Amino acid sequence: MKLGKRFGLTVIGLAAAAAVMTGCTETNAAKPAAGEPDAVKTAVTEESLGLRKTTLYSEQGVAPEKTEYINTPAGSGQTFNRAFQDAPPMIPHGVEGMLPVTKANNACKGCHMPNIAPAVQATAIPSSHFLDMRPKHKFDGKEFKKSIDNMKNETSVKKINKLAGARFNCTQCHAPQSQTDLAVDNTFRPEYTDPEGKHKSTWEGTKLYEGLDTVQE
C-alpha cells in the first residue's frame, strides 16, 4: 500500500512537471526575440517552395509547358553561339521528316558531308567524326586479348574515309533549337579558348590527342 501511494504520487509529480515545462515552452515560443524580423514569424507554405508554386498533393494543372521546336527550312535559320568551346552546335532548322536518324538512313549526310557542305552553304561534319577511336581487341576463337592497357587507357585512333559508325546518330549530341520559357534562367557565360569558338570547333588535328596517352595507327 505504501508503495502504491508512493508510485501514485510520483506519477502525479511527473505530470505536473511536464505541464509546467510545456507551459513555459509555449510561452517562450509565443514571444519572439527582440529585433526578430517579421519574416521569421510567418509560416512558409508548401506552395511557395520549389518551382511548381502549387500544392504538392495534386498533379492537376502542373504539366510543363510544351516545347516548341523551330520549323525553319534548312539554310534559312539563325545559328546560335555554341554553349561552350567545342560544344556540339544546335540544329538551326526544322527536322520534320528527318527523324529518326539511323545508320542506314541519315538525312543529315545529304547536306553536311564535307564534299557537299560548301556547295549548299551548310556546316561540314568535322574531321573528328571521320576517326575510328574504338579499341581493336583480338579474338582468335579461343583466346581474347584486350588492346587497352588498364593503367594507361591507351586506345587506337585511325583516320577513315567514311563517317564513323559511332557518329551516325547526329541527334545524340545535336539538338534542334526550341522556343520555350525556361523555369530557371541560364546565367552561364562561356569563355571561349579560341577567337572563333562561338561558331567553330577546334577539336581536330593534334587537339584530338591532348591529355590522352594514345597510340596512333
Image (spheres, rainbow, N blue to C red):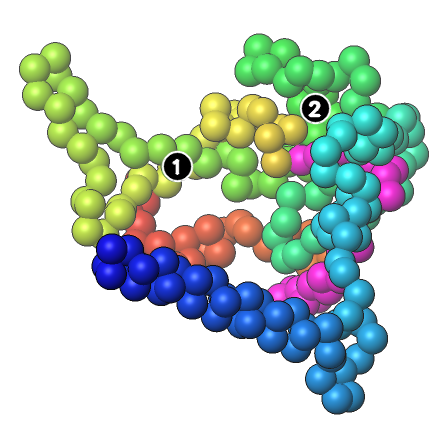
Q: Amino acid at mark 1?
A: Met
Q: Which residue reaches farthest bottom?
A: 34
Query: Is 52 in front, or is 217?
Result: 52
In this rendering, position of residue 3 left or right of residue 105? left
Above or below for 210 versus 104: below
Q: Is residue 34 above or below residue 196?
A: below
Query: In the rendering, at what x and y percent does residue 38 appear?
Result: 83, 75
Q: Nearer the viewer, residue 93 or 119?
A: 93
Tell me the amino acid under the disc marked 2: Cys
Q: Are marks 2 and 1 in contact (CB under 8 Å)?
A: no
Q: Position of residue 42 (x, y in %)?
A: 80, 65
Q: Is residue 127 left or right of residue 42?
A: left
- Residue at 67 percent across and 23 percent down: it is 109
Q: Where 167 falls versus 11 (above or below)?
A: above
Q: Is residue 190 magenta?
A: yes
Quarter location, residue 198: bottom right
Please report whichever mark, 2 or 1, sits nearer to the chain's N-terminal start. Answer: 2
Residue lying at 86% horizontally and 39% vertically, measured from the top left? 180
Q: Which residues are magenta?
A: 174-195
Disc 1 marks which residue? 133
Quickly name the residue at label 2.
108
Q: Is residue 92 left or right of residue 124?
A: right
